[in-house]
Each structure stands twice: as structure tokens, then as C-alpha cells.
């Protein structure tokens, strides 16, 4: 049954590529690669959904079909009631896209000139454009960058510039591919806070692909896992950690080399001189563990490392096996 509140709807969507490879001096062989294999899901208006998986899983192919860049080989796909591959130009006014390493900005122009061109492309009314630009510049800390040519921006600066560019025309749906790549800790926090405000204030629907689980934890109530073109999981991040029995790691630097640390709720998985690595369930709070270590051991420093998405998925498969 179709959810009438669904802004994005996929039903049995497939994408098959024909790939040719040389097998001898005179002969090439053609084979088919199924990048997306019968995926079905719906995203309701106002949701912020994480769409994760290892490299080559089919994430980018899915997003390209959702934007109309690629045409599905089979199944049914709709965004805001529109077939993306048939009405790509109409859909463009209702979506915003940030494709990781690929910028939508003009390389040799100052950032503000790229925005001015986009205003004309999307025919954004002057008052609306000024309001949206002011909001993005302030919250993404772009004021000092507006007169800088795009080619002179760092990856993190350009990423913030691309996010602003994708939002100038008030899209209903925002597709983000690795939005915090190349950003330092402070910039990551700024971008995440901006995206939360965007969703809360404007109800913008967000589909986020990322390898940073902290992006998912801080932005998404729902996460979908894709691997080998198939949807393997759709639910909460906590549920994913439970299915995969994934673990976070507490890295502890002691004042001196000691025997392996013994605390409830964690186990030592590696010792290198005065540094020790403790694994603990990803769904558990790190606070009691940190307090226990600090109380009982001569501590210099510590940090918490999130599990890699690839590790979470590998553990999920192992649990099913």
C-alpha cells in the first residue's frame, strides 16, 4: 500500500549496467552488473534518513536515479509524485543535491557569483534569494569566503558552499553525499547543526549518504543499509547496532605501561605500551566506562572511536550466518 505522505517512493527498482571487458587481443566480453537489485522503500515528508553501505553498494546509483541522472532498468520510482527520468527539469526545482567530491559551483568564479548564477537558473525571487543566502552564509560561516574563487577553497569550505548552493531555491528534498567530508570537528558540528535547523524550521526532507556514523547518530532517526544493490536493513541506528552486535572503541593513554585495564562493560582488544584499546557495545553509553577508567587508572588522555560502517555490516552478516 502506498503511503500518501511519502515524498520519495521506490518499488522494486533495479539498475543494470552493461560492462565490456577485454578477454583476448581480438575479443571483448559483455556482462551485466546489477548495481541496484529490486529496492523498495518510502521516505515521508520531513524525515531525515541515513542511506549507508560500503563503497560500491549502490548508494550513489540510487541517488542518481532519484535525481533523474540515471534511468531505472526496472521498477517504479517517484519523487514528489514525479518520475525523475521523464521530468528531470521539473523535478530539479523541487530537489537539492550535493554530490561529495563533485561541485555544482563554477570553478573560476567567486562563491557569490556562483550563487548569483544559480538565482537566475532557478528564477528565484530577489527577496527569497536574499533571505535564503543570508541564512546559509550566517549558519555555515561563509561570509569570509564569498569573494574567494571556488578553485581556491579547501574541500571543507567548498562542501559548505555546495550545501548552501543546493538550498537557495528552497528544495523539498535534499540529497547529501558525504556532507562532512574534509571538515574539521568544529565545521562538522556547524554543518550538522545547520541541517537539524533546516529540517526543524522548514521541514526539508533529507536523504544522507555517509561513512561517518556520527552524522547518522546526530541527524537521523532512521537508517537504511544497502549492500550489493539490496536493502539489508531499514530501522533505527540502535537496532542496526543490535543486529550487528557492533562495538565502539575507547582508546586510553595511561601515564605508564600497565597490565590490561579491567572494568565492567568493556574488554581490552589491544595494548601498545601505555596505550590500550577497549571495546564496548555501540549502543551503550561511554560515560560510565570513562568514569571507571579515570577513577582507577593514571589517565593522560582518551578518545572514543565509532565503528566503521563496513564493520557494522560485516558483523550484521556474521550474525545472520
Image (cartoon, grey):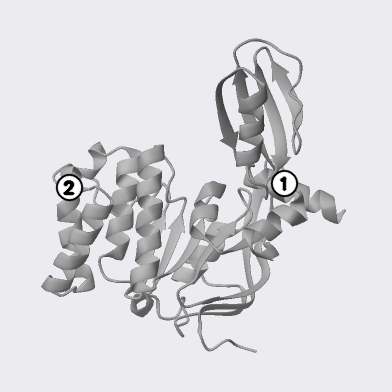
Residue at 24% over, 51% down: 106
Percent of width and height locating residue 127: 12, 72
The dot on residue 246 is 1
Percent of width and height locating residue 73: 61, 73
Does 200 sit left or right of 36 as displayed? Answer: left
Location of the N terminus (image quadrant) = bottom right
Percent of width and height locating residue 231: 68, 65
Residue 308 occupies quadrant: top right
Residue 186 occupies quadrant: top left
Position of 15 relative to 100 (above/below): below
Q: Specify which label sits upstream in the sequence, 1 or 2.
A: 2
Does 216 sit left or right of 151 as displayed? Answer: right
Residue at 72% over, 35% down: 279
Position of 278 relative to 213 (above/below): above
Q: Nearer the viewer, mark 1 or mark 2?
A: 1
Position of 124 relative to 320 (above/below): below
Asked which secondary structure carries label 2, the reply is helix
The dot on residue 143 is 2
The dot on residue 307 is none
Does 229 sit left or right of 215 as displayed? Answer: right
Asked which secondary structure carries label 1, the reply is loop
Q: How many residues crowd mark 1 within 10 Å: few (<14), some (14–19), many (20+)?
A: many
Residue at 16% over, 53% down: 112
Q: How many residues crowd mark 2 within 10 Å: few (<14), some (14–19), many (20+)?
A: few
Nearest the viewer among 96 and 311 is 311
Amino acid at each position: 500500500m502506498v503511503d500518501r505522505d511519502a515524498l520519495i517512493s521506490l518499488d522494486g527498482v533495479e539498475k543494470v549496467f552493461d560492462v565490456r571487458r577485454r578477454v583476448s587481443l581480438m575479443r571483448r566480453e559483455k556482462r551485466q552488473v546489477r548495481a541496484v537489485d529490486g529496492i523498495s522503500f518510502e521516505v515521508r515528508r520531513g524525515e531525515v534518513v541515513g542511506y549507508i553501505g560500503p563503497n560500491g553498494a549502490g548508494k550513489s546509483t540510487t541517488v542518481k536515479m532519484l535525481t533523474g541522472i540515471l534511468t531505472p532498468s526496472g521498477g517504479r520510482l517517484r519523487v514528489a509524485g514525479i518520475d525523475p527520468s521523464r521530468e528531470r527539469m521539473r523535478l530539479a526545482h523541487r530537489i537539492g543535491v550535493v554530490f561529495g567530491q563533485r561541485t555544482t559551483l563554477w570553478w573560476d568564479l567567486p562563491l557569490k557569483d556562483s550563487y548569483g548564477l544559480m538565482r537566475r537558473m532557478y528564477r528565484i525571487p530577489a527577496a527569497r534569494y536574499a533571505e535564503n543566502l543570508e541564512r546559509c552564509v550566517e549558519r555555515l560561516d561563509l561570509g569570509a569566503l564569498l569573494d574567494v574563487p571556488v578553485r581556491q577553497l579547501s574541500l571543507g569550505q567548498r562542501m559548505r558552499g555546495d550545501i548552501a548552493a543546493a538550498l537557495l531555491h528552497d528544495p523539498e528534498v535534499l540529497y547529501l553525499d558525504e556532507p562532512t567530508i574534509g571538515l574539521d570537528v568544529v565545521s562538522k558540528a556547524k554543518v550538522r547543526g545547520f541541517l537539524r535547523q533546516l529540517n526543524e524550521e522548514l521541514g526539508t526532507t533529507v536523504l544522507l549518504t555517509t561513512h561517518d556514523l556520527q552524522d547518522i547518530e546526530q541527524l537521523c532517526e532512521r537508517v537504511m543499509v544497502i549492500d550489493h544493490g539490496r536493502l539489508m536493513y531499514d530501522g533505527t541506528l540502535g537496532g542496526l547496532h543490535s543486529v550487528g552486535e557492533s562495538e565502539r572503541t575507547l582508546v586510553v593513554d595511561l601515564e605508564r605501561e600497565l597490565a590490561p585495564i579491567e572494568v565492567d562493560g568493556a574488554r581490552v582488544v589491544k595494548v601498545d605500551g601505555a596505550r590500550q584499546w577497549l571495546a564496548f557495545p555501540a549502543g551503550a553509553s561511554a560515560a560510565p566506562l570513562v568514569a571507571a577508567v579515570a577513577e582507577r587508572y593514571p589517565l593522560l588522555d582518551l578518545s572514543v572511536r565509532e565503528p566503521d560502517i563496513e564493520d557494522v555490516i560485516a558483523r550484521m552478516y556474521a550474525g545472520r550466518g
